[in-house]
Image: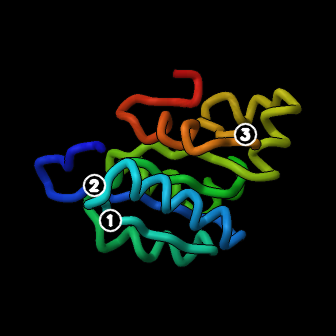
Amino acid sequence: MQPNGPHGPDTYLVVVADFVVLQDLADAIRGFDPEAVILTHSARADALASLEAHDRISVAFVEAGPELVEASKLDVAVEQRGGRLVLLGDDAEAELEAGSPLISDWLVMPRPFSNRTILNWLAPGGDAKT
């Protein structure tokens, strides 16, 4: 379990269209940090609006490639709140597999991923390689 920060419960964002994957990610976060505030959305626009009520975010898992994230300004919103943004899904994986220079500055969680993989991303400074 990750202890909460000095500002109260940590906040996490999950933006995934598939309800089962969205719930799996939220459940993994809840297992890591039972006191966490978990914002779940199936649309990036809804996610961006929900972040306005939060000053800090720990990690955001977003199903999108770099272009969509930049266009939606989710990257800026997460960065302004001190969080790490982890991309996942078809667009992010396609960029990663193609060796696109667009993806080189982004964190990507490729499939298949397990609960352990998710937990590695949740650890401070963590990524799937640790």
Specify the label residue 104 is tagged with: none
Say if mark 1 contacts mark 2, CB within 8 Å.
yes
Of the 4 image quadrants, the one containing the N terminus is top left
Report, in whole angstroms, how far the alpha carbon at label 1 lies from the one at label 2.
Answer: 6 Å
Specify the label residue 37 is tagged with: 1
Amino acid type for the residue under numbered disc 3: Pro
Q: Earlier in the sequence, mark 1 or mark 2?
A: 2
At x 79% / y 42%, what residue is drawn?
93
Residue identifier under label 3: 110
Residue 72 percent across, percent down from the top left: 60, 64
At x 61% / y 31%, what residue is drawn?
105
Relative to 113, is 43 above or below? below
Task: Give the farthest residue toward the left.
Answer: 6
120 or 86: nearer the viewer = 120
Total residue callouts: 3
Residue identifier under label 2: 10
- Helix, strand, or loop for circle 2? loop
